[in-house]
């Protein structure tokens, strides 16, 4: 069984996204620990990329700060090795196909296996082109996590049937960032997914309050939050772990209340 399934075993999952190296790798390490200690069931670690097409200004800013600070993929691998001494919950990388491609897919994915990364999310990898990475992921037991967006419509069944780990349901069109309201008909998307697979699905993009997390978890298997966490890190810098911990705790309560 995929290790990622553990995040969804007991109840609805709260998934936290954190950009590695913003403001520095030591702070990232403490933020990840704080999130795990306060109820996060799975952590998405963002590997910064210079042209993150799916990201709004908040996460773009985090990418820029991390890259300016000298973060590299190898340094992030070392960070995960350190984290795995304490953090037992599933962790996945979220990055761009170009990052994996330029590093060397085999080298990148085999390293994921060695350091304890359970899956990878590549938002810019079209479903039709996943074969470029999928065989290597299977070879090393790393889940290639699929995204389903409101525009997926007639492809939902196809993507769901082949999904592994969990399915990232994109709540709204456009880029990441907090939203005051989420208006997509997510219920019908989740229904279509459930008709085709028992792989859990979690909703992300635009969720920032416990109320939103509760509403999203009520119709799916969990809620994913990124920009709201990055804003806390941007505000508090090296002091952020404590505040991220408190925020994650409140969001986890929201998810559980669903």
Image: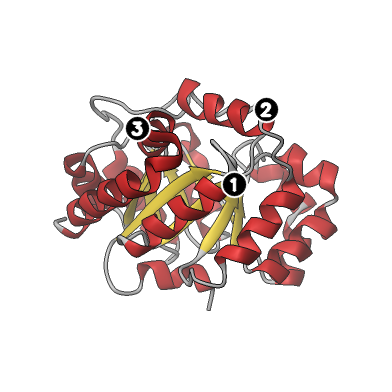
Question: Which of the marked residues, 3 or 1, is nearer the chain's N terminus?
Answer: 1
**Figure label count:** 3
The foreground one among 235 and 165 is 235
Name the residue beneath numbered marker 2.
68
Residue lying at 47% horizontally and 59% vertically, measured from the top left: 166
Q: Nearer the viewer, residue 238 or 147?
A: 238
Quarter location, residue 255? bottom left
* x and y, in percent, of residue 186 in the image: 31, 40
Is residue 225 visible in the rendered structure shown here?
no
Residue 93 appears in the rendering? yes
Between marks 3 and 1, how big is the CA–CA gap?
25 Å
Colour convention of the picture: secondary structure
Residue holding disc 3? 206
- Tell me what residue is drawn at x 76 percent, y 37 percent: 98
How far apart are the alpha carbons under marks 1 and 2?
Answer: 12 Å
Mark 2 residue element: helix
């Amino acid at each position: 069984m995929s290790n990622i399934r553990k995040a969804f075993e007991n109840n609805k999952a709260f998934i936290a996204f954190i950009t590695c190296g913003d403001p520095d790798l030591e702070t990232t390490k403490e933020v990840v620990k704080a999130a795990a200690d306060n109820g996060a069931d799975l952590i998405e670690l963002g590997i910064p990329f210079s042209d993150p097409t799916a990201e709004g200004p908040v996460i773009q800013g985090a990418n820029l700060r991390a890259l300016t600070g000298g973060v590299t993929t190898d340094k992030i691998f070392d960070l995960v090795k350190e984290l795995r001494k304490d953090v037992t919950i599933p962790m996945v990388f979220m990055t761009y196909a170009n990052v994996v491609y330029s590093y060397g897919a085999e080298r990148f994915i085999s390293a994921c296996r060695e350091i304890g990364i359970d899956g990878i999310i590549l938002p810019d990898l079209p479903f039709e082109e996943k074969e470029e990475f999928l065989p290597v992921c299977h070879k090393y037991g790393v889940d290639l996590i699929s995204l389903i967006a409101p525009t997926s419509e007639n492809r939902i069944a196809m993507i769901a049937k082949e999904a592994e780990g969990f399915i990232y349901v994109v709540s709204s069109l456009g880029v990441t960032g907090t939203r005051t309201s989420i208006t997509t008909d997510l219920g019908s998307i989740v229904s279509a997914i459930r008709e085709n697979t028992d792989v859990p699905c979690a909703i992300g993009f635009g969720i920032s309050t416990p109320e939103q997390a509760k509403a999203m978890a009520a119709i799916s298997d969990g809620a994913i939050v990124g920009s709201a966490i990055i804003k806390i890190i941007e505000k508090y810098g090296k002091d952020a772990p404590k505040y991220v911990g408190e925020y994650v705790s409140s969001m986890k309560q929201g998810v559980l209340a669903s």
